[in-house]
Every structure is written in C-alpha cells, then in structure tokens.
Image (tube, rainbow, N blue to C red):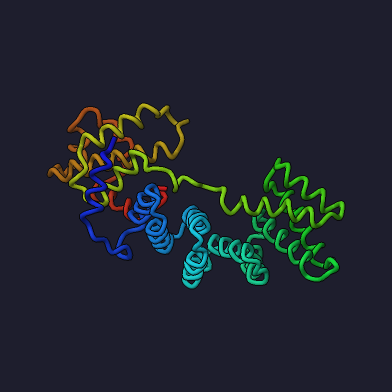
Amino acid sequence: MIEQKKIDQLMNSSAFVPESLNPNLNYLLARYFLSRKDYTTGLLHLELAALSKKDKRLYQALLILALKTGKLNLAKTTFEKILKEKRDFDALINLGKIHLFENQFQKGESCLKEVIGKEPENSEVLFLLGYLYLNLACTHSPNLDQGFISKTKTNLEKSSALGFLSGDKDFTEALKLLRDGKYQNARVKLKEKFDHLLTAEDKRIFRYLEDFERLLLLFFLDQTKVEKNDVEKIVSGYESLIEGESSPPELKKRLGIAYLLFLKILLREGKKNLEIACALDPKFKKAKYNLKVLNDAESRFNFLYSDLELVL
C-alpha cells in the first residue's frame, strides 16, 4: 500500500495555489480532502478541476457535492462560467437541474430547450422537461394548465420510448398516473426520480483513495517520493487481473499508466532510451506492447497532466 503518511506530510508542509494546479492534481486533491470530511476544501479543488477540464463526470460530482454541502450557488456559478466560454451541453443540463431544483422553471426550461434543440432525442433532457412542465401545470393556476399537461405527456412518453429509466417501476407507474389524469400523484413519483437523478450517479469521489490514486497523487505532489517498488506493486496487481482483450478498458488504461510511471522513474535515473528502459527489468519487457507507438516516453508521459479521463 502506498503510504498515506507520505501524502499527509507533503500536504502539511506544502502551500499550494489551487488555481495554478493542473486538473488531475485538483481532482485528486478533492478526493483527498473529501476522504477526510473536509468538504469545503474538497469542493474548491473540484470546482477548479471542472473549470479547467470540462468533463461530464466532474460536473455530476460537483453537483452532488454542492447539494451535500449546501453550496449550490457555487456549482451554479461554476456552470455559468463554463457556459460563458463554451455552450457545453453537459454544463447546460446540470445548470438546468439546479434551476429545476430551485423551482426556477423559466430559467430551467431555457437551459434544457437549448440542449433539446440540438439533441432532440436526449432522453434525460426530455424527462427533465416533462417533469418541469408537470410542475408548471400543477402550480400555474388553480385549474391545471392543459397546455403544460400536453407537453408533460409528450416529453415523458418520448423519454420512455427512448429507453430512459427503462424498467423502472416508479417511472412506469408515474406514466400510468398521468394517463389516468392523476397529475398530482404523478408529480410526487417524478419528484422522487428527479431527486435520485441529482445524487445517484458516480459517488466514487466520496470514497477513500485507492492505491493507484494515492500513487498518482504522490507523484503529482513530489515525484521524487515515488519509489520503484511502489509502482511495481501496482503493476503486478493490475497484471494479475488482465485477461487478454476481454479485460475492462479502464483496467488496461490504468496498467498502461503504471508502466509509464515506471518508465518515468527509470528516466529519472538517467535511462534516456525507451527500449533500454523497457529491457532493464525482464518483468517490464511486456510493457513494449503498450508503448510501441511511443517515440518519446518523456513527452508521452506529459499527457497525464492534461487528460483527466485517465484519472477519473
């Protein structure tokens, strides 16, 4: 196991300027602080990671954490900043969810309709629009607004036909209630589904760092603290799980990164030739198949600093 105390010591002795850090490090630091229940600092690093590396999973994690900490305005501001740079549909969807959660239906509709205009078969957005229109129908006036009811049915039925929440009993029951004209009851059912959507996706961010993630965090903090033995243990563990082409892509991706970390350590020791580096230890000769397209391990390794997908 990568010694946690090495990371703790570095964190206690270092003064970081979060805005200057690469998104990989900000993401891993967010994980580090969240595992210690320091949600405020974790949220800061997660926000910066999302701003610099726009990624759907980061957005969802940010929304979950903002809800958990009661700092929804921070998430809202982050998505608004992202959208000033680029009309990012994932950011629009999450901002739409926040507006819907806050009963700001007009703003929510604006975000979601922008997405559906470009992605007319986005089943999640169709569901969100259907739920939004049902809320408007039930709160618009003492008498249900039939225009909104019609939009509710159209969007939700299409969402269902496209496979959203396929097989979900509560969603199926909500659709039946709508068809039977029991709109308030359907609204209650759909609110449960909406609340679940806000918080039920990838919660990995709240778990303790795995050995692989501790190794990367330690490397990003101070690569001189990463020992060859640490990397070998990670590689051995992943190699034992690899079963040819049928192995999960994420597993092979992590093994490839571990090989690169090993090579980085060899390069740090002065072994500048990639082929020599691979041959230094017979155990790592098999690394060649991961690296055969690489002409320069040093420059190839730099993608770890920018490609957040490799860490998530």
- Lateral position of residue 18 relative to residue 248, left or right: left
On the rendered image, what quadrant is the N terminus found in?
Answer: top left
Quadrant of res 6:
top left
From the viewer's perspective, is residue 4 above or below residue 306?
A: above
From the viewer's perspective, is residue 303 above or below residue 149?
A: above
Residue 204 is at least partly visible in this image: yes
Q: Residue at x 48, y 58 (%)?
A: 69
Q: Residue at x 42, y 64 (%)?
A: 51
Across and down, in percent, residue 2 comes to 27, 38
Which one is nearer the viewer's eye here, 296 or 309? 309
Question: Looking at the image, how many numbered discs can be counted on the residues?
Answer: 0
Residue 56 is at least partly visible in this image: no
Which one is nearer the viewer's eye here, 104 or 48? 104
Across and down, in percent, residue 101 comes to 62, 62
Across and down, in percent, residue 214 comes to 31, 43
Q: Residue at x 73, y 45 (%)?
A: 170
Quadrant of res 110:
bottom right
Across and down, in percent, residue 163 comes to 69, 46
- Lateral position of residue 183 relative to residue 222, left or right: right
Q: Residue at x 40, y 50 (%)?
A: 37
